[in-house]
Amino acid sequence: MSAVMLRVRCVNSFLRRLLHGGAVNRDQVLEQLRVCSAEDQVFDVVGKNKAKLTVNHVSKAVGMLWHFQKEKPEMLRTVELIRRHPQFLTLRVLAENKIALMDDLMLVDILYSFLRLNLDQHDSLVQQLVSEAWLRIDRFPLTSLSKFSICLSDQHLQNSPLMGHITSIVDQRLSSIDDGRVLTTLMISVSSLVSPRLRDAFISRADHLLETMDPSNYNNTRRVVQFLRNVKHSYRPLLDKCNKIILRNLPRLDTDNISLIMGLYQSLQFNNCDFRLAVKQRLTELIDSSIDPFSFTKLFVALAPMAGRELKEGLENTALMLADELSAHQALAVLEALEETKSRNLSLLNKIALVIQRNLQVYKPVEVARIAQALVLMHYQNPELFTKLRNILVKFLEHRFYPYEVTMLTRVLSMLPCPRMDEGVISRVDAVVTQCNLNELNTISHVVAKWVRNDPSYRHNTPSKYVRLLQRLNRCGHERLQTANRLDLVLEELKYISGEWFEEMLLDETMVMLQRMTDQIHWTNVPELALFLTRINHLCPPLMDRIASVAIKDIHKIHHYATYTILLPFSVLNYDAEQTDELYDVCIKRFLPHISSFDPHLLVLLAYNLSVADCFPEELVREIFSIDFLGKLDAQLETLPDTLNMRNRLRLMELNRAVCLECPEFQVPWFHERYCQLLQKKGNGTVSPVQQQIHKMLGDVLGGINYVRVAVVTPYFYTIDFECTLDKHLQPLPYSKPSMLQISDRGQVHWGKSSEEIIRDVLPPGAQQVAVDFLDSRSFCKNSAWIKGEALMRKRHLEILGYRVVQIPHFEWNSMELSTPDAWKKYLKMNIFRELSR
């Protein structure tokens, strides 16, 4: 028995030694950290084990602190409290002392976590971690390289030599990146340094990985869109693919993510009907849960511009209740949304203005400029606030050196009420002019023109300070055009340029420059060039021919959406050359297979553009005038801004009219009668002095004012300036009733009945009606007497309606040859009775 007990005691003693040894070998501090469920517990472990903390413990503790914060909504995070905790300093000091002991993964992870906890980028720990990472960067795995690139972006080092080194590494290893998160993170981080070649390589790789990525991971897709925004490259095939993935995930996105994606789309000018309709539905579902200022502000900014009247009023009422709780930046976001929706809710606007006024000291220069611009555009009346904004903007401007900032601040300052501009502002503008691009120069020219008009001394003569500045603007603009050597960059600068200064001073030089770069016109920039020529209303046959030849050759590479933009100048400017017919044919063949994927409003614009050129593809016409399409178009137009909504409804009417008149075989009904009647009632009916003059002259030529009608509304609602009737011997016939639409002494026309209600005189056999239209400068290309497509289409349609059309170009009527009443009358006789004069 005693022997058995002895053996049991020996075994127990061995087990106790074994278990005690195991406990010693376990990392008790690490185990304590692992079971922590809050920041205070982590700090408690750190405080009790300062002397025992290893590099692994520090890494684990810092990582857990960020993990706990990341799991909370942004508004509930307590990063500042963490940074002020005494044990946070302990972790910071220990990390700095143990950098040499960190492996590569740990080094980057610790840097990432500390930066996420808002440790200052100039802190010695951050500086040493970055320096150590630079020494090891060539051996980093791609996951660590990706995370390190985020750290550099957090420190605003996107353009640093170190980020350049990362860009070079990524370029060499791009084909081996198979992780979508790693790829898309690197794409965003190095986006400011990529060459066109690397940009395209990124796009190709992302396009490939999107096919294999988990479609539920929409963040990767969102980062692809963000990369395209960063590099200003609206690559439509990839955007379409990203949009499909985002649409699939939309039902589970919150207002923050939806708002972010909408902002990216807007920057890329990417419009998608399905996305807008789905977003409107999803945001409407989120209204009841968006009750805090953060989420409601995001919801309001995204939904209000798409909302109907009743929904918008509900959103504004909620905004009014939450206004006092809004932060400075939330108030700015709401203000800009109110401006975008052209809100007339003065109570809400006053509340938002009060919040902004209380927080003026926290806004950055660009934000103050946005505030001032929104308030001016909304015609807000508060002289005291505008004076404060102006003083802040002037103070900001005195310390700005970047041309885009100086230009932006100067432009907004010119919008504010002010008798004259400060000398300091003029000096600051003068100092940066030589660094400005074409768009900035054009903006400054508009501002200088305002200064000249507002300066009291302008009544006597233009002050020399303005003259000198305008001369510098002209010289810098010409030099920039003469030295330009990359077409893509120039087109980017010309994208939004317009106005008298550009047209008078730089337009001719711009056309010379574009023709000098003809060999750089290729399929990727053809749409931008075509849009520019259309916008400036300038007919340039060499450039148009080059556009046609490139598009015909590479039509298979061009996205089907771009066919609309490419055809615009040919239709609008009425350019008909040897290749024009072939260009229309290849573009129609390119887009027809994809018409079901077009946004409804864009398909209407495309069809109208073709109708101007007397081109009516049957498949396209039947698609647009189907019940399903028109229903979808209505739904989409409700989500668009009012201006775009009205423009598309007008284009649909004009397309409907063109199809009815030119393609009766399609049997498309005319369903815009009521719409046209409403438009007619809204019209101001003002007649220009020249038209009044022509009216009087026509009365003299035809034998009396009762021989001519003014502002005649035809079937299908064309409005003819003047109408007269000639019998078979070309003798004028008087109207049995006086003109229903007479011109008042002030040039006002009072509209009468609709086109269906007008009782027309029965024409005697052989008689003809003559429509006389005065064509102002809008009917012609800017640089020539070449008549534009819409004026020709109008003439075609009036002829189909039975009129003989006489068009009077403004440059003929106002010429030196026609400077006397007798000359004008002779001109009218020659045109109206031209058959007798032959």
Image: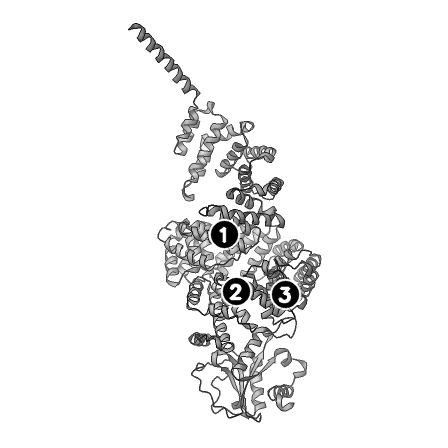
- Mark 1: secondary structure: helix
Which x, y percent locates residue 513? Answer: 69, 61
Which x, y percent locates residue 139? Answer: 59, 34
Specify the amino acid type for callout 3: Ala
Q: Residue 837 bears which disc, if any?
A: none
Tell me if residue 418 can be seen. no
- Does residue 98 sit above or below 711 in this rendering? above
Specify the amino acid type for callout 2: Leu
- Mark 2: secondary structure: helix
Of callouts 3 and 2, which one flags the residue occurring earlier in the amino acid sequence?
3
Q: Label 3, on which residue?
A: 548
Specify the amino acid type for callout 1: Cys
Q: Label 1, on which residue?
A: 242
Number of residues whose C-alpha sits closer than 10 Å to that of mark 3, classed few (under 14), some (14–19) or many (20 or more): many
Residue at 50% over, 80% down? 748
Disc 2 + disc 1, Cβ < 8 Å: no
Of callouts 1 and 3, which one flags the residue occurring earlier in the amino acid sequence?
1
| Image quadrant containing the N terminus | top left
Q: Residue 592 bears which disc, if any?
A: 2
Disc 1 and disc 3: Cα gap in Å? 31 Å
Tell me if residue 756 can be seen. yes
